[in-house]
Amino acid sequence: MKRFFKLILLLAAFIGVALSIDYWNVSRKEKLLSKAVSQIGGRSGSIPVWPLGTEYRITLTAIPTPEQLEDLRVANKMRGWVGIAFEGCQLTVDDVERLRKNLERCHVFVVQDGKMSPVQSVGEKQTNQALNASGRSRRI
C-alpha cells in the first residue's frame, strides 16, 4: 500500500510540475503576441480556457511590415483559435499571400463596411487571374 501511495504522490508531483511549465510557456507566448500586436497598433482580447486552449481575437488597423509580421508569427504557436481581422486596411493580393504564408494556423479576416469576411473567400484562381489580368496588385 505504501508503494501505491508513493507512486500516486510522485505522479501528482510530476503533473504539478508539468502544468506549471505549461502555464509559464503559454503566458510567455501570450506576452510575445500582445507585444507584437501593440507594436503594429492593434488590439487583442482572449477568452482563456487553459490548459485546453484559448480563443484569441486580434484586430489590426495597419498592414504589418515584414519585421512586424515575423514577430506576429508567434500567433501560429498559440494553443487554440486565433482570429486576426484587418480593419480599415486595403490588402493587396500580395499582402494576402504574405499573410497566408506567415499566419498559416490563424484565421484571417477583412472588415469592410462593418462586415467581417474571411480572407480565404478570395480563391487562388481569382487571385492569380487578377494579378495576370491587371499586371499589378489588386485591392481586396
Image: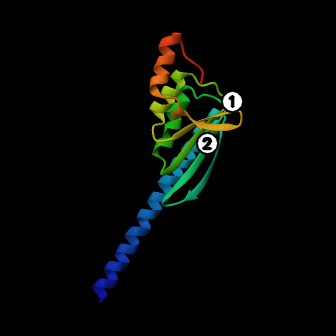
For label 2, count other residues whose C-alpha is less than 10 Å away and answer few (under 14), some (14-19) or many (20+).
many
Distance Cα–Cα, label 2 vs label 1? 14 Å
In x, y percent, where is residue 126?
49, 23
Image colouring? rainbow
Q: Amino acid at mark 1?
A: Gly
For label 1, count other residues whose C-alpha is less than 10 Å away and answer few (under 14), some (14-19) or many (20+).
some
Q: Quadrant of the N terminus?
A: bottom left
SS for tag 2?
strand
Q: Nearer the viewer, residue 42 or 29?
A: 42
Q: Nearer the viewer, mark 2 or mark 1?
A: 1
Q: Residue at x 49, y 61 (%)?
A: 51
Residue 138 occupies quadrant: top right
Q: Is residue 50 above or below residue 118?
A: below
How many callouts does the rendering have? 2
Residue 47 visible in the picture: yes
Q: Amino acid at mark 2?
A: Ile
Q: Name the side, left or right, on which 32 lies relative to 77.
A: right
Q: Quadrant of the C terminus?
A: top right
In x, y percent, where is residue 61?
67, 32
Residue 38 visible in the picture: no
Residue 43 occupies quadrant: top right
Q: Residue at x 46, y 45 (%)?
A: 77
Which disc is residue 88 wearing?
1
SS for tag 1?
loop
Q: Nearer the viewer, residue 129 or 20?
A: 129
Q: Residue at x 53, y 33 (%)?
A: 121
Q: Nearer the viewer, residue 6 or 57?
A: 57
Which disc is residue 76 wearing?
none
The residue under label 2 is: 58
- The earlier-in-sequence mark between 2 and 1 is 2
